[in-house]
Image: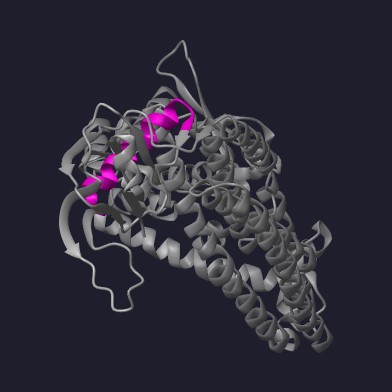
Amino acid sequence: MNSQFKKGVLELIVLLSVSKRDMYGYELILEVSKVVDVNEGTIYPLLKRLTNEKYFDTYLVESTEGPSRKYYKITSLGKKRMRELKKTWNEFSSSVNDFIKECGNNE
Amino acid sequence: MNKNEFLSALAKKLSVLNDSEKEDIISEYTDTINEKVKNGMNEKEAVKDFGDIDDLAKEILKAYKINPDYEKSSESFSQKSEAAIKRGAGKIADFSRRLASKFKNANELSLELVFEIVIKIFLVLIGLSILGMCFDCLCDIGEGLLGHSFTSPYSEILVTIWYLFIFSIFVLLGVMLVVTVFKKYFEVGPKTSNKSLNTKKENNKPVKKGTTIGDVLILIVKIFVIVWIIIPLMFMDLFALIGLILAIVYLIQGLDLLGLILIMIGIASVITYLIILLFKLILNKTKLSIIPLIVSIVFIIVGGVMFTFSVMSIDYYDKAPKGIKMDTLTETLDIKENARIHYNNFYNRNQDIKKITDNTFKDGEIKLDITYNKDCYNVSVDEEVIKEDCDDGTCTLDVVHYININAYAIDDIKSAKVAYKLFIDNLKDKKVYNYHKIFTGNLKITANEATLAKIAINNY
């Protein structure tokens, strides 16, 4: 898939996933991979950035099977950002779709 | 690569980050690899999924460049100060822009608005000068009342206090006038600021001219405020603080100056409050509690009352102060003829001259006793016998014995120190004496009755 498209929409997908429920790193990678094929390595930098920009909060949960896991939780600021990105995406994708339909007649 | 090779190689590439961040990231990747291994992958495959380790490290570091907070820890001092200066300059540029836009957002910019503002400034200036004249009057009245009902140095202190008090009120009223008149130009309601977000771009072009004029006007008003109001206020604040320190010093020495201290604190607070108020006005933050102002005015009033009481409880004695060291110069003279005593006192005309009759004295024998303070007054006696010349035959005296008492006040640091020390010591006991009397002396002339009759005393 075109990496330019992926990069732009990755933030939206990550925000949407975490807004469904709090997740830890690996869990989130799996979720996102369901939507787009993503380089796992780049998820963590993105999570870091989103956390630093106060869209996410993090907390640790003790695990019986191993070391404690860091969970990501979306903040109200993050929710606001998510709504903005969703809106932008919808506007963008619908105008692109309309244009495709238009050009489709000429094929 | 296996897990540990990957993790240590990654850690090396991330060494520029601080330790806690690095550990955080490494532990996340460790957990992910462990998770994947648990789900059946082997280490090599799990690591491969991350892609090229150099690209990965680059991506991770990119995330930190976005967040300036992380860079702070690794910056050198010069970089930090440079950044601080840039921030400061940015802030200044920022609030002038914010100010202009706030002004723009709060008002419909037009030529009428400009005229309105100019006229208001003009009116405010007239208002201020009228206020100023009123308070000048009040100052003069105060000076007249207070200046002449007390002897100096009290009158001077009280007059200065009155003047400061009136001036503070004048400035306060003036500032309130300016604020009320011009406040509405800086107020932004919630509606208007939201609008500005969306319509800012559209309004840019046609409104450009108006913004510039408004901008300049605001700048002029601000400069006016700073130069003519804030800077003098700062000087007054400085003097009030100096006065406060002096008052505390004297309080420690034992003078009852608590009232004066309260006044000084109150005045200093009022002035500081005014300065802060004006600064906040300039920076458009009109949130300022009025409580400190009220508290300081209360301080001034309470302090004023206390000080007045304390001043009024001071007793004034019109004589030389207690505790001064006096010396006596005694001269015994023998006069045969009529004598004239000149008491040449060059400083003070109110000297005491006493004639004492002592009939145990022989005829012609006189004793002069001059009591004075050596540090403040200098006395010497000399005599000459002169045959008075009279052409017209009207003088009845042939030979006159002139006795000159030369005296003058010593006006130097030593005498000033003596006077000062006496003043302070007696003030501690709430007594004030006539300190001019230090700079003079008392003359006693003792002789028998017959001789005293022959002595004429001129003093001028």
The residue stretch that appears in magenta:
B409-431
Q: Foreground: B77 or B65?
A: B77
Q: Foreground: B402 or B344?
A: B402
Q: Is residue B220 left or right of residue B193?
A: left
Q: Which residue is pictured at 18% across the width and 37% down the height? A: B330
Q: Residue furthest top?
A: A64
Quarter of the picture containing the C terminus of chain B is: bottom left
- Res B172 quadrant in image: bottom right
Q: Is residue B218 left or right of residue B55?
A: right
Percent of width and height locating residue A51: 51, 41
Q: Is residue B111 left or right of residue A76?
A: right
Quarter of the picture containing the N terminus of chain B is: top left
In the displayed structure, B211 sits above or below B16; it is below
Q: Main secondary structure of the magenta part?
A: helix
Q: Foreground: B132 or B296?
A: B132
Residue B267 visible within the image = yes
Q: Which residue is pictured at 21% across the width and 33% down the height? A: B362
Number of labels in the image equals 0
- Res B360 quadrant in image: top left
Percent of width and height locating residue B364: 21, 41
Magenta-span inclusion, residue B333 = no
Percent of width and height locating residue B30: 35, 30
- Res B20 quadrant in image: top left
Residue B51 visible within the image = no
Percent of width and height locating residue B150: 58, 46
| Colour scheme of the rendered structure | one colour
In the displayed structure, B58 sits above or below A79; it is below
Q: Foreground: B103 or B119?
A: B119
Magenta-span inclusion, residue B416 = yes
Q: Is residue B299 left or right of residue B210?
A: left
